[in-house]
Image (cartoon, helix red, strand yellow):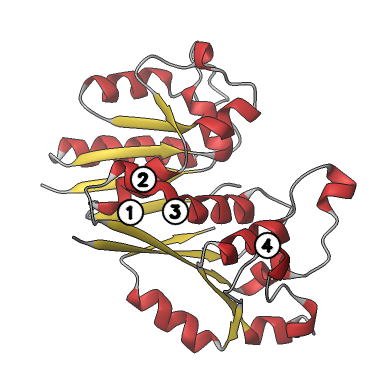
C-alpha cells in the first residue's frame, strides 16, 4: 500500500476542488492507501467547524469527520487560517494546524503528490 | 539519507490570485522541513516561472506602497537568499517583450549569492524531469 499526499488550495465554497480532494482521499483509503491532506490558502475554509449544509454550497464537514475517523490525516496551514480569522477554536476537531513545512515533510515519503492549486 | 526534490511551477500572474506567493512561501518552507524528517533527509525546492507566471518576476513591485503587503518580488529575493534554484522561461519573457533587465535577477541587498536564471523552456522541462514531484501553481 502506498502513501498519497494531496495539497488543496481551493476554497470550500466557490469550486468543487475540495470536494474532489475529499472524494479522492476516500477512494484511496478504500484501497488501503494512507492519505495526508494539506489545505492551504482558501482551502483552509474546510477546517472550519459548524458548517451548515445547503444544497447550493459544498459542505464537507460530515465526510471529512468520517474519513478522519478512518485515519485521514488533515492539516491546515496555520498562517493561512489565522489570516482569514479561522482561529484554533473555530477548527474542526481532528484537523491539525501547522506551518507550510508540514506539507513538504509529508511529500518526503509520499509515493504520489497531487497538488491542486487555488482559484 | 534521502532527498525528495520538489519542483514548484508558477504559471499564473501575481496578485490576481494567491497562488504565486503561496508557491514561493511553500518553497521557502523547504528550509525548515527538517523538523519533520530523520537526520540527513532533505526536501529541496526548485522554482520555475513559466507562461503568465513570468510576470511575477517584474522588478520594482509596489505591493507595500499600494496594498501594505510583501511583494512577490521580495519573496523571490528571499528564495535567492536561501539558495533556491529559480528559473524563468526565456520564451515567455520574450512573448511579453520583457528581458532580463525588466525582472528580478539578484538580491544583493538581501545578501543573496544566488541569481535568477533566465533559461529556454527546454531547460525548465529538464529540471522538471529531475524532480520527484511537481506542484503547479
Given this view, does label 3 or label 4 mark the residue nearer the observer? 4
Question: What is the residue that sits farthest to the front in this orientation?
Answer: B111
Circle 4: element type? helix
Residue labelled with disc 1: A113
**Quadrant location of the N terminus of chain B in the rendered image:** bottom left
A108 lies left or right of A85: left
Residue labelled with disc 2: A6
Given this view, does label 1 or label 3 mark the residue nearer the observer? 3
Circle 3: element type? helix
Distance Cα–Cα, label 3 vs label 2: 21 Å
Give yes or no for contact between labels 2 and 1 (Cβ–Cβ under 8 Å): yes
Q: Do labels 1 and 3 share a chain?
A: no
B97 lies left or right of B137: right
Chain letter for the residue marked with disc 2 in the picture: A
Q: Do labels 3 and 4 share a chain?
A: yes
B78 lies left or right of B121: right
How far across and how far down the image is residue A5, in percent?
Answer: 31, 46
Q: Are marks 4 and 2 on the same chain?
A: no
Q: Are marks 4 and 1 on the same chain?
A: no
Q: Is residue A113 above or below residue B7?
A: above
Q: Could you tell which of marks 3 and 4 lies nearer the N-terminus?
A: 3
- Residue toward you, A69 or B14: B14
The numbered mark at residue B110 is 4
Distance Cα–Cα, label 1 vs label 3: 19 Å
The numbered mark at residue B31 is 3
Amino acid at each position: 500500500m502506498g502513501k498519497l499526499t494531496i495539497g488543496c488550495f481551493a476554497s470550500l465554497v466557490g469550486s468543487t476542488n475540495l470536494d474532489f480532494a475529499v472524494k479522492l482521499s476516500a477512494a484511496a483509503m478504500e484501497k488501503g492507501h494512507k492519505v495526508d491532506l494539506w489545505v492551504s490558502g482558501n482551502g483552509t475554509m474546510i477546517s472550519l467547524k459548524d458548517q451548515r449544509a445547503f444544497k447550493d454550497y459544498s459542505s464537507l464537514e460530515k465526510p471529512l469527520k468520517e474519513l478522519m475517523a478512518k485515519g485521514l490525516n488533515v492539516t491546515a496551514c496555520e498562517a493561512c487560517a489565522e489570516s482569514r480569522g479561522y482561529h484554533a477554536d473555530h477548527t474542526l476537531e481532528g484537523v491539525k494546524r501547522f506551518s507550510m513545512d508540514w506539507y513538504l515533510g509529508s511529500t518526503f515519503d509520499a509515493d504520489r503528490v497531487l497538488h491542486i492549486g487555488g482559484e | 539519507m534521502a532527498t525528495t526534490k520538489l519542483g514548484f511551477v508558477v504559471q499564473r500572474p501575481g496578485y490576481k490570485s494567491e497562488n504565486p506567493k503561496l508557491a514561493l512561501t511553500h518553497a521557502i518552507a523547504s528550509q525548515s522541513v527538517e523538523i519533520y524528517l530523520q537526520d540527513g533527509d532533505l526536501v529541496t525546492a526548485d522554482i520555475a516561472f513559466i507562461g503568465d507566471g513570468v510576470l511575477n518576476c517584474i522588478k520594482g513591485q509596489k505591493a507595500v506602497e499600494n496594498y501594505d503587503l510583501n511583494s512577490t518580488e521580495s519573496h523571490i529575493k528571499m528564495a535567492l537568499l536561501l539558495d533556491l534554484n529559480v528559473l524563468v522561461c526565456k520564451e515567455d519573457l520574450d512573448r511579453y517583450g520583457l528581458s532580463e533587465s525588466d525582472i528580478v535577477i539578484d538580491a544583493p541587498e538581501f545578501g543573496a549569492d544566488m541569481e535568477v536564471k533566465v533559461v529556454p523552456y527546454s531547460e525548465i522541462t529538464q529540471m522538471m524531469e529531475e524532480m520527484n514531484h511537481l506542484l503547479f501553481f
